[in-house]
Amino acid sequence: MTKLCSPLSIILTETHLSDSVLNAEVSIPGYALFRSDREGRTHGGTCVYVRNDLATQVLACHSNSVCETLVLKVKTLDLILVSVYRPPDSSLKHFKEAIDLCKNSIDQAMEQD
């Protein structure tokens, strides 16, 4: 038997999205789209779809042209979602920058609560 479900969120990496792709072109009915597109190069990127009934705040959205990062707070659930895309050939320096951004964003959110 097939069961229809509506996940709280859908997280995708290596989206290959850019400014030339409108949100309306990649929308999913019933979900808000949050995205971090690669800047300065092609490919890469990450996006998160969160159900429309969940109040969501962007804590961080960043691309260092190598790694893309999204940190979201789902206020309704007191939940933090993190998505980082790190390509296989990226340096530890670029990845550390993305991870530090995540940590700082989460720390700031915790201080505000």
Image (spheres, rainbow, N blue to C red):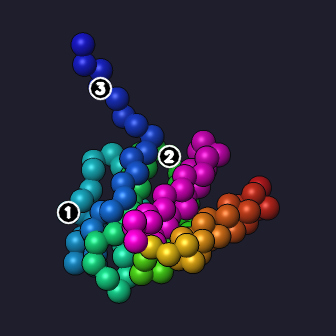
Residue at position x 60%, y 71% in the image:
96
Q: Is residue 23 left or right of residue 83?
A: left
Q: Which of the two discs, 3 and 2, labels the residue nearer the N terminus?
A: 3
| In this rendering, position of residue 18 left or right of residue 89 | left
Residue identified by numbered label 2: 54
Query: Against 7, is 1 above or below?
Result: above
- Report the Cα–Cα distance between label 3 and label 1: 24 Å
Question: Residue 110 at x, y = what percent?
Answer: 75, 57
Q: Which mark is residue 25?
A: 1
Q: Is residue 43 magenta?
A: no
* Residue located farthest toward the bottom when viewing the structure as drawn: 40
SS of the residue at dot 2?
Answer: loop
Spatial CA span between label 2 and label 1: 22 Å
Residue at image mark 3: 4
**Residue 78 is one of the magenta-drawn residues:** yes
Q: Residue at x 69, y 68 (%)?
A: 104
Please provide percent x and percent y for residue 75.
61, 50
Q: Residues within 10 Å of mark 3 (few under 14, many from 20)?
A: few
Q: Nearer the viewer, residue 30 or 8?
A: 8
Q: How many marks?
A: 3
| N-terminal-most mark, 3 or 1 | 3
Specify the principal SS of the magenta part: strand
| Mark 3–mark 1 CB contact (< 8 Å) | no
Q: Is residue 96 visible?
A: yes
Which mark is in front, 2 or 1? 1
Q: Judging from the image, what secondary structure is the residue with disc 1 in?
A: helix
| Residue 36 in view, yes or no | no
User: As shown in the figure, which amino acid type bears the numbered disc 2?
Assistant: Leu
Q: Tell me the amino acid under the disc marked 1.
A: Glu
Circle 3 sits in a helix, a strand or a loop, which is it?
Answer: loop
- Which amino acid is tagged 3? Leu
Q: Is residue 55 left or right of residue 65?
A: right
